[in-house]
Structure formats: structure tokens, C-alpha cells
Image (cartoon, helix red, strand yellow):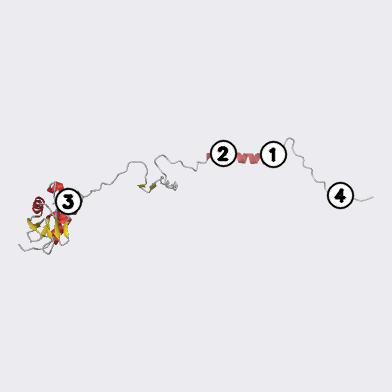
Amino acid sequence: MAHVIPSIRTAPRPVYTPRPGVRGDASKTTTASVAALDFQTLLKKQPSAVVTPKLGAIPLTTATPATTPAPSPSGTIGSIMLGAPGPVNNPVVNEPAMAPTAQAMFGANPWINNAGGSGPYGSYSYNKYYFATPETASKVAQLLGGKVVETQALTPYGPFVQNQANQMVQMPDGRLINAGIIASYYDRGWSQQSVDALVKGEISGGPMVQT
């Protein structure tokens, strides 16, 4: 027979018996549900982080989003319209005033039309602009402040002879100006400014004669 010492006998492990009606993880599930409910409640009670600015006022803490300029409409470069429809403001250009015609200044026939000459090789014709009529010469003299003088200005000597004299205007300083040339400046459709410049050139560059 075996002898068993009671003091060293191994005690049996206690058996855990759960309470009726309660699952082993019920306490954990209930605790997690309560924690989730409390967190959601707390989140709902927190103030919203998004602040909607009032109309007409921009909070200093609200960053203004960067804006990209809208592309220019077709047919424009900056503020210059390139054929776009709409009114166009044309700049006013002050054009020089046109001089009156030679006929308006000196009458219907300012020049002698049959002026010519003759020489060793026969007769020939001159440009009419060199031969003003006496009436034209008188008006040119009044315009320039001189007096009319008749001369053979184109053929003063030699074998060539004019059939009409040149109507010249003698200026106070002795210069001679062809009245027909002055009248021709009004027959070219030039501005009064251009005519005045040409007349001034004739006055300052004519030949000198002794009175």
C-alpha cells in the first residue's frame, strides 16, 4: 500500500463558474458603448471651428483666397480693342487748312496761255506758270507789298526772244519775284501753311536789282 502524506497533496484548481445570464465580454462592450456615446455627446457640444463671415465684413483671421484674373476676351490686348464690336472713339485730327484755288485768288485766267519764244531753231512754248497776267501780277504785288515790273526774265540776252514779258513783283529791298510762280502755288492743292512757306522762300531767295 502507498502512503500519502496529506500535507503535500496538490490542491485541486478552483473552477470559475460565470453568473447566469451574463456573457464573459459584456462588461467590456458596455464600457466601450458608454465611452463612444460620451465622446459623441462631447463632440456635439463643441463650438464649430468654421466661422462664416458676415456680408460686407471680412474677419482679419480669414485668409482671402488668391484670385486668378479672368482671361482677356477674344480680340483684346489689355485695354486696346482689336476689332471688337462697340463704339470706337476716333481721335480728332486737326488737318491743315487748304489754301484757296488760284482762280479764287486771281480770277478765271491767272496766266497767259500762249506764252512762248523764238530762236535759231524756230519757235517754242513756255510753261504758263512763268507768265502771269497783269491782273494777277497786280494782286500778287498787293499781297507781297511790292510793285509790278515787266521784264524779259527768261531771255535777257542772246538769240532767244520771248513773245510775252514776265510780270515781276519788285520788293522794297529790290528783289524781283515772278508773279506767275507765286500764283502757281495756289494751283497745286497745297495747304495754306505750305503756300506761306514757299512764298517766304521766294521772298528771301530772289535776285537783287537796282531801282
**Which residue, as the protein is rendered here, is positioned at the far top?**
21
Identified by mark 3, the residue type is Tyr
Earlier-in-chain disc, 3 versus 4:
4
**3D distance between C-alphas at marks 4 and 2:** 61 Å
The numbered mark at residue 26 is 1
* Residue at 18 percent of width and 50 percent of height: 187
Residue 178, percent across and down? 12, 57
* Label located before the other in sequence (3 or 1): 1
Q: Which residue is mark 3?
A: 186
Q: Nearer the viewer, residue 28 or 139?
A: 139
Q: Position of residue 95 (x, y in %)?
A: 23, 49
Task: Tell me how far mark 3 sits from mark 4, CA to CA.
Answer: 157 Å
Q: Amino acid at mark 4?
A: Pro
SS of the residue under disc 2: helix
Q: Residues within 10 Å of mark 4 (few under 14, many from 20)?
A: few
**Residue occupying image coordinates x 38% and y 47%:** 76
Which comes sooner in the sequence, label 4 or label 1? Answer: 4
Q: Please tell me which of labels 2 and 1 falls first in the chain.
A: 1
Q: Secondary structure at mark 1?
A: helix
Amino acid, disc 2: Thr
Examine the rendering and report whether any part of residue 184 can be seen. Answer: yes
